Image (cartoon, helix red, strand yellow):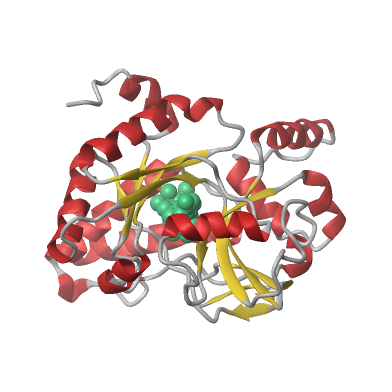
Amino acid sequence: MNVELQIKTLTEQLNQYAKEYYTLDNPSVEDAEYDRLYRELAKLESENPNLIRADSPTHRTGDVVLSGFEKYTHEYQLYSLQDAFSREEVEAFDARVRKEIAAPEYICELKIDGLSLSLVYVNGVLQTAATRGDGSIGENITEQVKRIKDVPLVLSEPIDIVVRGEAYLPRKNFQKLNAAREEEGLPSFANPRNAAAGTLRQLDTKVVAKRGLATFLYQEASPATNATQAEVLTYFEKLGLVVNDQRVFATNMTEIWDFIQKVATMRDDLAYDIDGVVIKVNDLSQQDELGFTVKFPKWAIAYKFPAELAETEILSVDWTV
Ligand code: NAD
């Protein structure tokens, strides 16, 4: 196959998979397979920049919004994260950061495998909740999100703030849901992420209330009221937003890799699915300095764990080398 045709085929295939995943909540391939094809396309595109197609998934975030939901235009764009699949790729990220920032401090967080959310509070009151959509336009799912018990309808301070986070279905609730569906003769959800996405797109909000979704908030989208990401998370807790408690600071690759290794071993014991670790520059003014590409912040990277099937094998590898 010539390169042009290869690029066209991969683009169309990935766009079809993205539609099934983001819009229909019903993926037909594993994430690892999607990631493999995505990388293949990204490599071909970097070698042949003149052949990049306008609809390439490497230049877009997420997918189009579903009709049936009101569209919501985000005031602040929601970005995706650049992926890393090896220690070398995290090292390369660290090296890129160090070109701009002499001695960066990182904060490492769990990468929650759920659905990206944006919550808009006005005067401390939840005004709008929306999905990420394509990063600029999402779906207005305010009524659905109001049925998630841990989302505060009113913050502890009467402030205007836009926060980002992840809605997810705890593993226990996912198992309960699939068992009930099986009994009713309904198809099971492939995984908690798809179940969470499908649940938030239920027009009947009673269904949302019943399924027991939960949230972790991790980012302030509106102009920062704090100096560091760590302070943002502490402030969120004070406001009444739920923040994940697993996070560490790191100033070098050894510390970053130690945390990744620790998380890999405790991953199965968590009450919710994660698919990696997000490493972020902690200082928000340094984040501003580093800025964004068209799709990703340059101040963060998501290390993704190897696919579930390969996990046992991978975990037996000596992570310290
Ligand atoms: P992503 O899921 O790889 O990473 C970005 C997202 O991580 C953010 O938008 C945010 O919602 C989330 N996140 C979780 N914890 C976070 C934290 N602590 N800090 C910051 N962000 C956090 O990117 P994406 O664009 O949402 O999805 C791409 C991935 O989706 C692919 O790599 C693939 O694995 C999967 N996918 C699969 C299929 C399929 O057919 N199986 C299709 C499309 C995409």
In the displayed structure, 70 sits above or below 19; it is: below
Q: Would you place residue 278 above or below residue 231 in this image?
A: above
Measuring 34% from the left and 30% from the top, which residue is drawn there?
A: 261
Res 20 seen here: no
Q: Quadrant of ligand 1?
A: bottom left
Quadrant for the C terminus, please: top left
Q: Is residue 51 above or below residue 209?
A: below
Residue 208 seen in the current view: yes
Foreground: 85 or 17? 85
Where does the image place residue 215, in percent across and percent down from the top left? 64, 51
Q: Nearer the viewer, residue 109 or 46?
A: 109
Say left or right for 19 vs 122: left
Q: Count how many numbered circles sit on residues in the image.
A: 0
Foreground pick, 40 / 239: 239
Query: Which quarter of the figure has residue 70?
Result: bottom right
Residue under the image location 30 percent in, 32 percent down: 258
- Residue 286: x, y in percent? 29, 67
Residue 121: percent from left, percent from top? 67, 73
Q: Quadrant of residue 320?
A: top left
* Outermost residue, right side: 206
**Picture quarter with the N terminus:** bottom left
Q: Is residue 149 left or right of residue 115?
A: right
Nearer to us in this view, 230 or 109: 230
Residue drawn at the location 75% of the way across and 54% of the way down = 148
